[in-house]
Image (spheres, coloured by chain):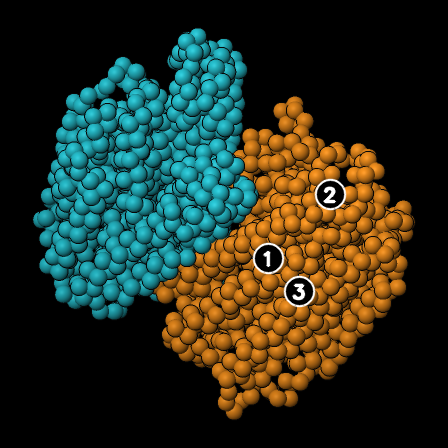
Chain colours: A cyan, B orange
Amino acid sequence: MSDMMMWVPLFGVVALLFAFWRTSWISKQDEGSDTMKKIGKHISVGAMAFLKAEYRILAIFIVVVAILLAVANRGGDMTYLVSLSFIVGALASGLAGYLGMRVATKANYRTAQAARSGLAKALNVAFAGGSVMGLSVVGLGVLGLGGLFLVYTPMFPDMSMRLSVLSGFSLGASSIALFARVGGGIYTKAADVGADLVGKVEAGIPEDHPLNPATIADNVGDNVGDVAGMGADLFESYVGSIVGSMVLGATIYVGSNLATEFVYLPLLIAAVGILVSIAGTFMVSVKEGGDPQRGLNIGEFGSSGVMVVIMFFMITTMLPETFSLGGVEYSNLGVFWATTIGLAAGLGIGFVTEHYTGTNTGPVTSIVNQSQTGAATNLIAGLGVGMQSTAFPVLIIAASIMGAFHFAGLYGIAMAALGMLANTGMQLAIDAYGPISDNAGGIAEMAQLPAEVRERTDKLDAVGNTTAAVGKGFAIGSAALTALALFAAFRTTVEALRGGPGTLNINITDATVMAGLFVGGMLPFLFSSMAMGAVGRAAMAMIGEVRRQFKDIPELTAALKVMNKYKEGQKMSDEDQKTFDAADGKAEYGKCVTISTEAAIKEMMLPGLLAISTPVVVGYLFGAEALGGLLAGVTVTGVLMAIFQSNAGGAWDNAKKMVENGVEINGIKYGKGSDVHKAAVVGDTVGDPFKDTSGPALNILIKLMSVVSLVIAPLIATIGF
Amino acid sequence: MSDMMMWVPLFGVVALLFAFWRTSWISKQDEGSDTMKKIGKHISVGAMAFLKAEYRILAIFIVVVAILLAVANRGGDMTYLVSLSFIVGALASGLAGYLGMRVATKANYRTAQAARSGLAKALNVAFAGGSVMGLSVVGLGVLGLGGLFLVYTPMFPDMSMRLSVLSGFSLGASSIALFARVGGGIYTKAADVGADLVGKVEAGIPEDHPLNPATIADNVGDNVGDVAGMGADLFESYVGSIVGSMVLGATIYVGSNLATEFVYLPLLIAAVGILVSIAGTFMVSVKEGGDPQRGLNIGEFGSSGVMVVIMFFMITTMLPETFSLGGVEYSNLGVFWATTIGLAAGLGIGFVTEHYTGTNTGPVTSIVNQSQTGAATNLIAGLGVGMQSTAFPVLIIAASIMGAFHFAGLYGIAMAALGMLANTGMQLAIDAYGPISDNAGGIAEMAQLPAEVRERTDKLDAVGNTTAAVGKGFAIGSAALTALALFAAFRTTVEALRGGPGTLNINITDATVMAGLFVGGMLPFLFSSMAMGAVGRAAMAMIGEVRRQFKDIPELTAALKVMNKYKEGQKMSDEDQKTFDAADGKAEYGKCVTISTEAAIKEMMLPGLLAISTPVVVGYLFGAEALGGLLAGVTVTGVLMAIFQSNAGGAWDNAKKMVENGVEINGIKYGKGSDVHKAAVVGDTVGDPFKDTSGPALNILIKLMSVVSLVIAPLIATIGF
């Protein structure tokens, strides 16, 4: 089977070629009016400026960490090459973010233009943008991991050492992902909260209105947060689950020989998954008048189904019928079941997510009802819903851990995570399509296109909601299982160096393990508080700047005054219209973009460094047992806080949308502008940093800490022993 | 030393005699005007009605659990007597709540009356009330545990079996405590939120105004939540830490003999602590013109200092110079150091609490500043502060675990918890004095006493704030360490039955342990969501009732209309004054009391049963390892969520108070009624169920789950082995 490994990088190349082909197709689409082009350009320049500023800082970080890794691993065994893996992983992650964002900022205004002629055409453009992101991510992952594996094969005949060096790739991907998620999250929410609070609430202008100086920053934020941030996030999950299962595969013996097929299998499944994802993107395409939801469903669930069948054949033909792991006999069919358990868990969590955050569901309606007595009860209800929503996902995760372990030991847990992520290319295409449609809507608004265009883009955005909820379920479930797989990989690596199974006993009732567990459990709280504090500070700066412009730029002041004289939809007098038009383009968008960029770059450093350095410090000072406790603590509370925050945020968001669409509570009707709406807006604003900054960043945090531990495992294996 | 155990119950009797003596002193104090008597009576009747309704339900629960315990432990060895211990523990807890509440509802209006003549006199009455609560709690604890121990000594010559049966006492105390805390918390916050939202915000009448139908319920709530709830809480901590350290003490050998002095020591320290607490109450008494803060400080820190010295002599004279535990040699001085570490940790956490929640501190000021942009930013800031505030306490707890273990093994961890709680009598006296002063203020308001009376009671309340923050630190720190001690006791009990140390290996990387850890970690989230949901529902019912009365009772409607014509302090016309006076006593307080009572009783059941049944179900179905994971998970996230919620709530509360006293943000002044104030009120309202319902209940949850596990340990020891 090792011959087949030769071809793995080729699949990555295929994915990238596909991505380039779709990109050039998008470039050929109609760009629309000059105003649209101008707005589109504003957004893409802002987004690229952020990426450039971010990467400049990260370059320093990469160089420093690479040197540290090389020095720590110096010696005759060439393991210092782990820093090469790290650099390649970091570059691949950065490149994936760049490619995805470039195409997203091309596709957004072209989608708005396409929406002028029809829904289906807009869907095709937006989805093409998403699929470029998706295929870039999996392509770079498979190319990078597969390529490095080939390079390292002759250098490190010992499989564990080879994988140990390879794990640096995952570390590179994870650290960039964390910075991208945190930075992007801060950027997008600072702009969003700032634009909303001064623009919508204080000045009374609609969302995405060109008079609002923060509106470009807001739309840039959607790209850096939801597209680049999410891309980096899934890239690291994808890579992490592959690396985790490869390392665990390297502990499996058939007779007295290492069964290398268990090591190869994860990478081969990922490679084949690329073809399935490409096929999946073709299923989505709809004709005018067709049902876009159906297209997405077929793409999502159809390709997942195909993937299950393919995995069944790959697992049963490539793996030996029975094998032994940790002293227990398992069958290859068990590995397949573990994979299926992962998929089922992802779907299950997705449906629970939908239940707790979807419009008109019981929990979200309860938030709406409790908004009648004001913001305080809206918030109490939302916090309650978020906390409650952790119950079923955690039970599902616990059951999958036990189930996957039952069927295939620790390897089963890793393969369960891989099962969820084999179809990442397609999944990410659907996820990234949402923010592109959202952006298109913003551009339609700013360019003052006819109302039906905005309606179409809103519909496009809404269509992706259920699939996006399922995607969230996969993200959370796979993060938990990937972190556990990496954790198990850390344990087996330490045990291999200590002399075999059972030499690392992370017994909860030991004082050091318990102390590690407490400190680890605290980190997601501290990390979230840093992220929320950063959003708060950045939003305050943004609010100050928008207020300043409204006061200091005479054209804006005049236009705002004029605007508030009229109700929505009412026609202005000619003179007023002139005053109003005079303000067009006077808002200094660039200043707001700069504020968001600088705040995001500055504020992402501390939480990022905290995440990376804590396992190193704990591992060196207190040993592998304490580090094990730390990882368990951070994983458990990280998963809980991620679900709590994401779902509370999602529920508040949709509660607000429900009120905006008009609701009836105890026989009284409420809509936009009512007191109930104001209460719901407060909840939504609180939920913003929850669901888009700290919540998703926690998914990365838990994997990053595990992968840091895995990489430093050889260095600390004998401490505290 | 076993002779000394004979005398232990006597110390309990002394405490109770002291409590009766103070009670009769309070009864002799001036009751004030007829109005005050009437209001006082309203409150005490409401409080007793709640207690009666609560105890009626709990009686059924106690009988059912006692039967289940007896049946599960049936057989020839008389271990079914664990259900006797359970009943005695439950009754003692209930009695402590009853005694404390009875005296608190006697002391509140007498304190208001005393405040008419001076601050010192009011302090003495209020503190006498608190000291009755404090001494009742420790008296019943020592009497109950000491008495049962004597009874069981001849029946169970085997020490582990004797302690195993005795542990039922702790289970009884813990289960009653959980119901009392949850029920009391729901009661007080439903009344508080309801009174505030309709009374203050909608109708515009001041707090504690007699026109507000929910105002009596609000004051009853302070008694059932802050007095009875807290008393039951500390009773169970106190008992839990004694039982935990006794069980762990029974694993210590000197040579080949069980060193029973380690078992006796905790109870003896508790007994002597009673005398120190009584002495401490005398230190508090101040003369007119004296500094009340100084009195409390001397009482609190003076008696703690005395306790440390006494513990030093008891430990060094009673324990052998060296002993062996878990294969390691420790010294008796090590036990003393472990105790001191506990005390230092409690103080440290207290100071951190004060930093994150006190008025004019950095974090609280940051919340005030972020209130300038509205409720949403106030909330984001508060949530961030709460999350951040977990960091140092958790680091302190982790360090104490490692330190105490280093000095005296698992016994050291238990003794660290005991060290914090040895002075419970005094600590609780100070804690309970706060709500009594608060109630006195409410009564002064309702009875329309001169403004200076309210000022004095406000000052009294404020004086206790720092000591109360320290008390909170002790509550959280001791909850964590007590839970760990009980957890360790669970482990040693299971290991003893399985055949010795090392037979229960709760290895975090095992699939079942990890699954247990996840589920355990989730429970505090689910539990909090239940508590918050309950408060939300009960508050809505209360709001509905208050609105109804304002609409349906013509005198109230008229008086409200009149009242809103005048600004605060303005004099009414004679006719208006007549209309206003006509409304006096027309509000149907009883209906609001009934709503709070019924809601509290109904809503406390599900979370309570969840807490008690989960360890049983997990233990029986998945075995001791999974249960170990569950306990670790619930302890870690329970402690984190408790700190997060309590401190966020405390910070919001004081941020609001800062605004009410007038603040300056960016050169602009804000005070009562400003937009900043409105934003701060929203934060405070959200914080109410956080800090007074779910937060404190979590402290009990973690201990309860550990003690349930300890009690069922003999029954499940061989499951999953």
Badge 1 crowding class, 10 Å Cα cut-off, few under 14, some 14 to 19, many 20 or more, is many
Q: Is residue B412 above or below residue A569?
A: below
Q: Which residue is mark 2?
A: B559
Foreground tag (2 vs 1) = 2
Q: Is residue A365 above or below residue A20?
A: below
Kind of residue at badge 3:
Phe
Q: Does label 3 or label 1 sit earlier along the sequence?
A: 3
Instruction: Give the spatial CA distance, label 2 vs label 3.
Output: 30 Å
Q: Is residue A236 left or right of residue B423?
A: left
Instruction: Give the spatial CA distance, label 3 vs label 1.
Output: 12 Å
Foreground tag (2 vs 3) = 2
Kind of residue at badge 2:
Ala
Q: Chain of mark 1?
A: B
Q: Is residue A689 above or below residue B218?
A: above
Measured from the top left, where is residue A309 in percent x and y? 14, 55
Given contact means CB atoms under 8 Å apart, are the residues at marks 3 and 1 in contact? no
The kind of secondary structure element at disc 2 is helix
Measured from the top left, where is residue B478 in percent x and y? 61, 60
Q: Can residue A675 be seen from the camera position used here?
A: yes
Q: Residue at x 84, y 38 (%)?
A: B574
Badge 3 crowding class, 10 Å Cα cut-off, few under 14, some 14 to 19, many 20 or more, is many
Camera-side residue: A442 or B97? A442
Measured from the top left, where is residue B13 in percent x and y? 77, 75
Q: Is residue B453 left or right of residue A33?
A: right
Camera-side residue: A403 or B191? B191
In the figure, residue A126 lies in which quadrant? top left
The kind of secondary structure element at disc 3 is helix
In the rendered structure, find residue B50 and report the number of the disc placed on it: 3
Q: Which residue is mark 1?
A: B186
Quarter of the picture containing the C terminus of chain A is bottom left
Given contact means CB atoms under 8 Å apart, are the residues at marks 2 and 1 in contact? no
